[in-house]
Image (cartoon, grey):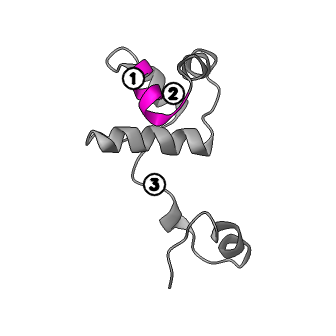
Amino acid sequence: MSKTNKNNLEGRFDADKNVLDYFETEVVLNIERLADLAPILNLSALAREAGINVQTLQTKIRRKTPLTGEETAGLIGALKKRRLATLA
């Protein structure tokens, strides 16, 4: 069976096939978790590394606006690049 990717995700989902391999199920990262970590993380540097506008990330944290899938993936990628992760 081939791996799920952005090109076949929707088709596999519609066909009732397993798509969990596409998602980072062991890593928990949401806006609430980022707000909890804000005092000990340089969120500006993290946002830049993830390709997210710094003000956008700061506003989302302040307003508790959910992250998009792309933002979450970018942030997780930036953390992994430095061998970091956030777990539940």
Horizontal and vertical percent position of residue 2: 51, 81
Residue at coordinates 66% horizontally, 75% vertically from top-left? 12
Observer-side mark, 3 or 2, equals: 3
Indicate which disc, 3 or 2, sits on the residue closer to the N terminus: 3
Q: What segment carries the magenta color?
A: 44-52
Q: Nearer the viewer, residue 82 or 25?
A: 82
Locate residue 86, reporting x and y percent: 36, 38
Please indicate whether residue 46 sits to the left or right of residue 19 in the image: left
Instruction: Give how far apart the Cα atoms at labels 1 and 2 are.
Output: 18 Å
Q: Amino acid at mark 3?
A: Glu
Give the residue number, with chain letter if any, for mark 2: 32
Distance from the alpha carbon under mark 3 to that under mark 1: 22 Å
**How busy is the neighbourhood of tag 3: few (under 14 within 10 Å), some, or many (20 plus)?**
few
Mark 3 or mark 1: which comes first in sequence?
Answer: 3
Which of the two marks, 3 or 1, is nearer to us in this view? 1
For image coordinates 55% across by 71% down, the residue present is 4
Say left or right for 79 vs 48: left
Q: Write the residue at 62% across / 78% down.
A: 17
Q: Quadrant of residue 52?
A: top right
- Give yes or no for contact between labels 3 and 2 (Cβ–Cβ under 8 Å): no
Q: Which three-letter amino acid code belongs to the residue tagged 2?
A: Glu
